[in-house]
Image (cartoon, rainbow, N blue to C red):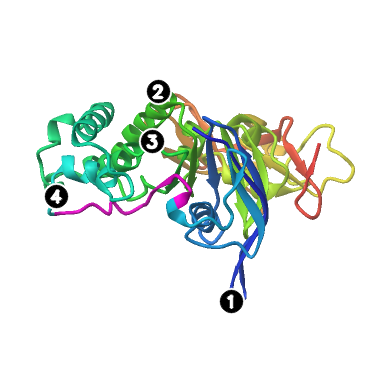
């Protein structure tokens, strides 16, 4: 596997700046996830690395070699798309073997068989090798699509939301499978998604994108606990972080320059209250089995937090809400540490 370095990359389509001054280094064997909403520049970044787009400026290096102007076929990268893109008339074996049978590779058939069987076993689809791709479930088809990239043993895997079209159970299963495979192969993976759960559970580091710029990068814990601004703070956490103007709820030792505070579940103290001590009302309790979502109204503001399923709080109750060591932000939304 190889390291990847992007330096000052920019790409514009018409009047849209898709990627802007983007710099990122991915270590060999690292699993990096780019997280952001639609239009943040995630897919364009992958296409630039793959050579499907040419940057307007900046450079791309793989293992120290400048490949900025190298054609896609010469970059030794494998791209896994959101769509399965399988050949319906071919068996699973032949779909997996297809990249190895290209004229550019000319891999012997005995080596192809050994490689395909090894990858199929790793993906746990070895019992489906004789099936047509049209006879597979959605999860199995995505495994074949991932396997077609694995057989090539490229320098880096580029993955463009490969699990987003699957149902929740399959996504959860394949997240674990993909992380297991990445560890076994020590593979270098750049993975893009808008799903915070995928980012949190798979990444060594998460890069947060906004309008083509890399806003912050760090481990999942760093991004969650120590965001640089409101935008980054809102990308992780379920339910989403509550951002309220200063003074809406009591908060100790708030910085004088704080304009707003961010409160996740762990930053809130909630108690039943009577009379003057109450400062909020519990509007609605959303029962989710292993936890409850509490929807709280404080004057004109609302916030959402979690509670244990055994909590005795009930809709309509008067309560007191206080912030305990929340995150503080200035008027521009930047973090005050």
At 25% across and 27% down in the image, what residue appears? 118
Q: Left or right of 326: which side holds 241?
A: left
- Disc 4 versus disc 2: distance between alpha carbons? 28 Å
At label 4, counting other C-alpha atoms closer than 10 Å, the crowd grade (few under 14, some 14-19, many 20 or more) is: some
- Disc 2 versus disc 1: distance between alpha carbons? 42 Å
Q: In the rendered structure, which disc, 2 or 3, sits on the residue that comes first in sequence?
A: 3
SS label for mark 3: loop
Q: Left or right of 244: which side holds 68?
A: left
User: Which residue corresponds to mark 3?
Assistant: 153
Q: Left or right of 210: which side holds 1?
A: left
Q: In the rendered structure, which disc, 3 or 4, sits on the residue that comes first in sequence?
A: 4
Eye-nearest disc, 3 or 4 = 3
Which region shows up in magenta?
A: 74-88
- Disc 2 versus disc 3: distance between alpha carbons? 13 Å
Predominant secondary structure, magenta span: loop
Q: Is residue 283 visible?
A: yes
User: Which residue corresponds to mark 4?
Assistant: 90
In x, y percent, where is residue 137?
18, 43
User: Which residue corresponds to mark 2?
Assistant: 184
Q: In the rendered structure, which disc, 2 or 1, sits on the residue that comes first in sequence?
A: 1
Eye-nearest disc, 2 or 3 = 3
- Disc 3 versus disc 4: distance between alpha carbons? 22 Å
At label 3, counting other C-alpha atoms closer than 10 Å, the crowd grade (few under 14, some 14-19, many 20 or more) is: some
Q: Which quadrant: the C terminus?
A: top right
User: Which residue corresponds to mark 1?
Assistant: 14
């Amino acid at each position: 596997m190889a390291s990847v370095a992007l330096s000052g990359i920019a790409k514009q389509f018409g009047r849209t700046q898709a990627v802007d001054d983007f710099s990122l280094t991915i270590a060999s064997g690292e699993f990096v996830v780019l997280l952001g909403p639609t239009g943040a520049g995630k897919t364009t970044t992958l296409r630039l690395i793959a050579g499907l787009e040419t940057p307007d400026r900046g450079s791309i290096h793989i293992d120290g070699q400048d490949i900025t102007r190298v054609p896609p076929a010469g970059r030794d990268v494998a791209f896994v798309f959101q769509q399965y893109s399988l050949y319906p008339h071919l068996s699973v074996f032949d779909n997996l073997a297809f990249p190895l049978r290209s004229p550019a590779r000319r891999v012997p058939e005995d080596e192809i068989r050994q490689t395909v069987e090894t990858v199929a076993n790793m993906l746990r689809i070895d019992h489906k090798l004789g099936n047509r791709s049209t006879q597979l479930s959605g999860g199995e088809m995505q495994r074949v699509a991932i396997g077609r990239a694995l057989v090539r043993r490229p320098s880096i895997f580029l993955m463009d939301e490969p699990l987003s079209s699957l149902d929740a159970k399959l996504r959860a299963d394949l997240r674990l499978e993909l992380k297991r495979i990445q560890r076994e192969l020590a593979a270098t993976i750049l993975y893009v998604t808008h799903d915070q759960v995928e980012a949190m559970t798979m990444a060594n580091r998460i890069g947060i994108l906004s309008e083509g710029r890399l806003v912050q990068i760090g481990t999942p814990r760093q991004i969650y606990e120590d965001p640089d601004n409101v935008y980054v703070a809102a990308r992780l956490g379920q339910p989403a972080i509550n951002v309220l103007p200063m003074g809406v709820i009591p908060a100790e030792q708030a910085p004088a320059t704080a304009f707003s505070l961010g409160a996740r579940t762990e930053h809130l103290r909630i108690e039943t209250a009577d009379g003057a001590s109450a400062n909020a009302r519990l509007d609605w309790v959303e029962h989710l089995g292993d936890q409850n979502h509490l929807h709280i109204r404080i004057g004109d503001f609302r916030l959402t937090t979690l509670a244990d399923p055994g909590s005795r709080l009930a809709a309509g109750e008067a309560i007191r809400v206080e912030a305990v060591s929340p995150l503080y932000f200035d008027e521009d939304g930047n973090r005050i540490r």
